[in-house]
Amino acid sequence: MPHTVKKILTWIFWIFVIYAIFTNPDQAADLVVTVWEIIVNGFSSIGIFFDRILGR
């Protein structure tokens, strides 16, 4: 992808994120919390997986 197109798409993405936060902050916060929980659960599951492989 050409650098200019990538730069334009990145700007559009961040403008949309800022717009979403300002127009509906409660839903934006819920989305951030949900994404954070998915990340934490993913790392926790990976840890459990390796613990079980190692027989702990």
Image (tube, grey):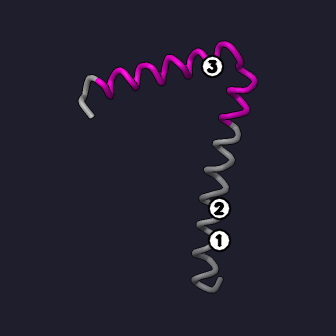
Image quadrant containing the C terminus? bottom right
Identify the magenta region.
5-32
Q: Secondary structure at mark 3?
A: helix
Residue 8 image position (x, y, % from top left) = 35, 20
The image shows a total of numbered marks equal to 3
Picture quadrant where residue 23 is located: top right
Q: Quadrant of residue 1?
A: top left
Label 2, label 3: how far apart the Cα atoms are: 30 Å
Q: Is residue 17 magenta?
A: yes
Looking at numbered disc 3 in the image, what kind of residue is underneath it?
Ala
The residue labelled by disc 2 is 44
In the foreground, 52 or 10: 10
Disc 1 packing (10 Å; few <14; some 14–19; many ≥20): few
Question: Mark 1 to mark 3: distance in Å?
Answer: 36 Å
Identified by mark 2, the residue type is Ser
Left or right: 27 in relation to 19: right
Q: Badges 2 and 3: C-beta atoms under 8 Å apart?
A: no
Q: Would you say the residues marked 2 and 1 are in contact, meaning their CB atoms lie under 8 Å apart? A: yes
Q: Which residue is mark 1?
A: 48
Mark 3 burial class by Cα count in 10 Å: few <14, some 14-19, many 20+ = some
Q: Specify the amino acid type for callout 1.
A: Ile
Tell me: residue 14, above or below residue 42: above
Q: Earlier in the sequence, mark 2 or mark 3?
A: 3
Residue 12, placed above or below residue 46:
above
Label 2 and label 1: CA atoms lie apart by 6 Å
48 versus 41 height, above or below: below
Residue at the spot of label 3: 20
The residue sitting at 65% across, 13% down in the picture is 22
